[in-house]
Image: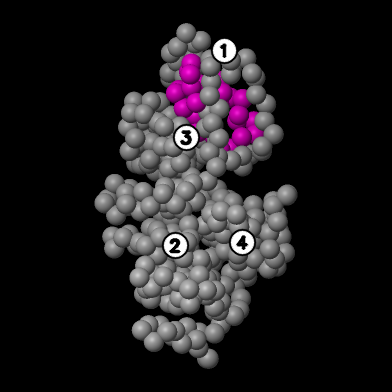
Amino acid sequence: MRSIVTESNATPVIPTTMRAVMFHAHGGPEQVQLEIIQTPRPAPHEALLRVRAVALNGFDPMVLRGIPGLPTPLPMIPCADGAGEIVALGPDVDRDRWRIGQRVGIVPIRPGAGMIGETLPGVAAEYVAIPTAALLPLPDAVSHVQAACLPTAYGTAMRMIHTRARILPGERVLILGAAGGVGTACVQLARLAGAEIIACAETEAALTHLRALGADVTINTATQDYLSEIHQRFGKPSIWGGGGVDVVIDFLGGDNWSRSIACLTRLGRLLTCGASAGFEVSTDLRYVWSFEINIIGSNGWEAADQIRLLEMVADGRLAPVIHATRPLAEYPTALRELISGAVIGKAVLEI
């Protein structure tokens, strides 16, 4: 096989072709396949990474199906989150900051350009070319797998918990859809913030896992109505204060929205970063003004959030929840498991 030889002070030999997960049309997992394509070359301000780990996210099946109003370049390589090591550098890259062999994580959000794995080609491939502005050096104590878990799920949760909701010790926090990547991250980060956590999921296996992560109360939403459970356990909210919860984290939307509002105590905060169950919701404004409720949006995260998470993993405060690791060729299997709702935490591909 012909190879690309990197600069003289480097040792890696890079093949001219590579394996990549790709889909050429929108649809279900049957559209995804492993292909052999040309290995990219780094542009002047880019680094070429040998990808070592990739993590799936809840929006991966949404992008595969096609999101109205969000253009996806086809053919498409999925996945936003990954980590690896630098094997080649573009000619204009700062050699004092970046070097061959350096272990790095990727910041998927590219301001002004879009989102990797969503509107920009993803990282489910053996090699990717990434602008060095979107790279973060990895601490020695953080593995590639751990780093790949952090950006979208944990970054989103970090911004919600700390930047937008500013959750305080002792506050009561209800987390819907707590078993997924963002949900488990919210449970962990809210626990570290000192909150009392009520976590919702649809299986007893997930609830058991959430209790192990630090959830104080768990609710099986397949058999229990979480609004009734909140009122029964903590009292019905009063406009004079008391009852209910201080914060609801609801990234489901749909029919959940109105019930989430009804869970909140006076001056409570309803926090959302998405709407996987539907973005057209019903809001009874009487609750909003009577209980002086704050509705807070949270959109993505920033590189500073990801850096903070890397530091937390490095010093042992945080351990990403990993559901399973598989080889790259098993991406369709991991995707089907994600779609089925069986994933607790993060599904990872090791390359």
Is residue 312 shown left or right of residue 88? left
Residue bounds of the magenta highlight: 245-269
For the residues labelled 3 and 4, the Cα–Cα distance comes to 27 Å
Decide which of tag 2 and tag 4 comes sooner along the chain.
4
For the residues labelled 2 and 1, the Cα–Cα distance comes to 46 Å
For the residues labelled 2 and 4, the Cα–Cα distance comes to 16 Å
The amino acid beneath tag 1 is Ser
Magenta span includes 263: yes
Residue 201 — which label? none
Decide which of tag 2 and tag 1 comes sooner along the chain.
2
The amino acid beneath tag 4 is Leu
Residue 164 — which label? 3
* Residue identifier under label 4: 120
Residue at 41% across, 32% down: 166
Magenta span includes 201: no
* Residue identifier under label 1: 290
Select label 4 or label 1 by which is in front. Answer: 4
Q: Position of residue 167 (x, y in %)?
A: 40, 31
Residue 182 versus residue 292 in the image, above or below: below
Decide which of tag 3 and tag 1 comes sooner along the chain.
3
The amino acid beneath tag 2 is Leu
Decide which of tag 4 and tag 1 comes sooner along the chain.
4
Decide which of tag 3 and tag 4 comes sooner along the chain.
4
* Residue identifier under label 2: 135
* Residue occupying the far top of the picture: 240
For the residues labelled 3 and 2, the Cα–Cα distance comes to 25 Å
